[in-house]
Amino acid sequence: MGISSLMLRMRRALFPRLRMAEDAVLDELIRDALLDEALAVPSAGAWERLLSAIEDGAARRQGMWVLEEVSQQRRQRARQEQHLARIERQVTLARQGRADHWWHLRDALWGNMFPTYAAWVNW
Amino acid sequence: MSRSDTTVPDAELIRRLQEADLDALGILFERYRQRVYRTALAIVRDPAAAEDILQDCFLKVYTNAQRIDAERPLAPWLYRVTVNLSYTWLTRARNQRMPLEQVTDHLVSPMKQAPDQLTEETEIRQNVRRAIGELSLDQRVVVVLYYLNNLSLQDIAEILDLPVGTVKSRLFYARENLRAALDPNLGWLPEVAHGYI
């Protein structure tokens, strides 16, 4: 603590009225320093931005639901395509006489007998 | 009903907002936007961030409308959300691995202003601004709520969910820190030096 600071503290302790005066000055200085903020106003488009954020939020929530559904459809389609490729391979093997085992023809046979077989397998 | 309607009480507007009435939100926004913006600006010292905080604050009003008690005053709730969002913003800014000096510069620097305005600022005023910026965040928040918003210690305690004694203590130490930082200025102020006040 410097000597000038010590003197100030002693002066304040000895003269309470001075301390009160300094407090009042300090209050004024702080209020004055915050004057920029006290007079600041948000930009004119603040309300429109808020509305847009609310609408975007709603759209995003809806969008996520749609995206989820698309993603599920995509997974299901990939599974169906995979199964279709297996049946095609079995039919090709049968035509070429290279189906050594009965299960090589299983899906093709069942598919011919019961048209709903593919749907049931893909469930 | 116009956006500037001042006759409708907050409680009724909140009830309407709970039924997803955007006009009610518009009136509340018009009523409180300046208080929210100014508080955020005084804490974070960044106009763009303060705009974001204003928006986030009213988004919270909209999304949490069902949980707001319409019978209680809205202003303390808004102040609390504003302070919390400001804390979050400052914490994120610090976590962005900014060098410490840069963070301090950001906090203590005057807001973006035109050069002529800057030159008009007195040295003392700049010193006070710098000193406020150097206060701890807890002390700065209390100073902003007390001096900028003219809130009572009791109101601040309610907003910050703290005992009144803690708020009083933070304000006392904030003032002492400011006094210590400004002692030469205070000592040389002519009104004080000559005992006019």
Image (cartoon, rainbow, N blue to C red):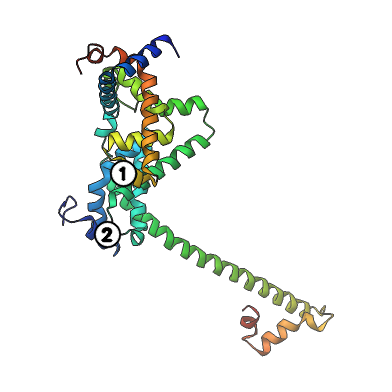
Please tell me which residue is depicted at 77% across the width and 80% down the height of the picture: A95
Instruction: For the C terminus of chain A, give its image quadrant.
Output: bottom right
Percent x, y of residue B144: 33, 35
Extreme residue in the right direction: A100
Label 1 to label 2: alpha-carbon separation: 19 Å
Q: Chain of mark 2?
A: B
Callout 1 amino acid: Gln
Number of numbered discs visible in the structure rendering? 2
Of residue B10 and residue B162, the one placed in the foreground of this image is: B162
Which residue in the structure is indicated by mark 2?
A: B71
Percent x, y of residue B71: 27, 59
Q: Nearer the viewer, mark 1 or mark 2?
A: 1
Decide if residue B182 is in sight here.
yes
Extreme residue in the front direction: A14
Secondary structure at numbered mark 2: loop
Of residue A20 and residue B42, the one placed in the foreground of this image is: A20
Secondary structure at numbered mark 1: helix
| Left/right of residue B121 with respect to residue A104 in the rendered view | left
Percent x, y of residue A64: 47, 61
Query: Could you tell which of marks 1 and 2 lies nearer the N-terminus?
Result: 2
Q: Is residue A94 above or below residue B144?
A: below
Callout 2 amino acid: Glu
Of residue B104 and residue A64, the one placed in the foreground of this image is: B104
Name which quarter of the figure residue A15 lies in: top left
Q: Which mark is residue B154?
A: 1
Q: Is there one chain holding both mark 1 and mark 2?
A: yes
Extreme residue in the bottom direction: A113
Name which quarter of the figure residue A63 lies in: bottom left
Please tell me which residue is depicted at 23% across the width and 55% down the height of the picture: B10
Q: For the residue carrying disc 1, how many other residues have a C-alpha within 10 Å: few (<14), some (14-19), or many (20+)? A: some
Instruction: For the N terminus of chain A, give its image quadrant.
Output: top left
Percent x, y of residue B48: 36, 37
